[in-house]
Image (cartoon, rainbow, N blue to C red):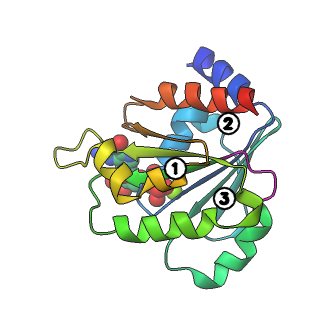
């Protein structure tokens, strides 16, 4: 839908976003919902677990978190100027929520991310056994991010449900800063 794409590219004008989450959380599916397949051009040069996508003046960095200690050091160099960190969570993946929590808080401790807003996408809400956004918020201890601007949004990347609302929130963050 070209109209949808036009409105999204307006939202993202000159933004620096990082999209993180465990493998299989739904990051790539969400990107496709945001941008349409045609708009997604990845640069494979950074590393096997990191994608850089540029759409006009917006830069997306997408990477899998968890269990890649050796790569993490080099990721730090991409934090600079990041306005929003988007964490994608597979809401059915109870077992790995602790790992996600640790990775999130570890990442947010970085000095270059002190001004970044945090958007958590509680994805796969279409699945019967999915955790609610409130449950995930509690498990990730999002309330401890009190000084930071953060938001959690339930969504389903397959249908796109919840994603327009998350874009509204992102737009409000950019306007506020
Ligand atoms: P990643 O990029 O974070 O690793 P992907 O995750 O976007 O590749 O998604 C991983 C799998 O989850 C894919 O399934 C994808 O279709 C599925 N998925 C993503 N979002 C949702 C959702 O909202 N609901 C459901 N039910 N599935 C979702 P496959 O089978 O292609 O591996
Ligand atoms: Mg992916």
- x, y percent for residue 85: 62, 50
Ligand 2 is within 8 Å of the C-beta of the residue at disc 1: yes
Tell me which numbered mark, 2 or 3, is placed earlier along the sequence. 2
Label 2 Cα crowd, 10 Å radius (few <14 / some 14-19 / many 20+) = some
Query: Residue lying furthest bottom in this view?
Result: 70
- Residue range (magenta): 79-84
Label 1 Cα crowd, 10 Å radius (few <14 / some 14-19 / many 20+) = some
What SS does tag 3 mark? Answer: strand
Position above or below: 146 against 1: below
> In this orientation, does residue 65 appear?
no
Tell me which numbered mark, 1 or 3, is placed earlier along the sequence. 1
What SS does tag 1 mark? Answer: helix
What SS does tag 2 mark? Answer: helix
Position above or below: 167 against 45: above
The alpha-carbon separation of the residues under discs 2 and 3 comes to 14 Å
Residue at 73% x, 50% y is 115
Mark 3 highlights which residue?
51
Mark 1 highlights which residue?
28
Tell me which numbered mark, 1 or 2, is placed earlier along the sequence. 1
Mark 2 highlights which residue?
39
């Amino acid at each position: 839908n070209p109209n949808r794409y036009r409105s999204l590219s307006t939202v993202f004008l000159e933004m620096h976003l990082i999209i993180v989450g465990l493998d299989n959380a739904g990051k790539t599916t969400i990107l496709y919902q945001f941008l349409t397949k045609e708009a997604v051009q990845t640069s494979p040069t950074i590393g096997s677990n990191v994608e850089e996508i540029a759409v006009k003046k917006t830069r997306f960095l997408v990477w899998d978190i968890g269990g890649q200690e050796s790569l993490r050091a080099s990721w730090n160099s991409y934090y600079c100027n990041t306005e929003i960190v988007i964490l994608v969570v597979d809401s059915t993946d109870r077992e790995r929520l602790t790992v996600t929590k640790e990775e999130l808080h570890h990442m947010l401790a970085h000095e270059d991310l002190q001004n970044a807003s945090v958007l958590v996408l509680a994805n796969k809400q279409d699945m019967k056994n999915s955790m609610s956004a409130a449950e995930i918020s509690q498990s990730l201890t999002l309330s401890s991010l009190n000084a930071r601007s953060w938001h959690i949004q339930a969504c389903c990347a397959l249908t796109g449900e919840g994603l327009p609302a998350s874009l509204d929130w992102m737009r409000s963050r950019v306007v506020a800063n």
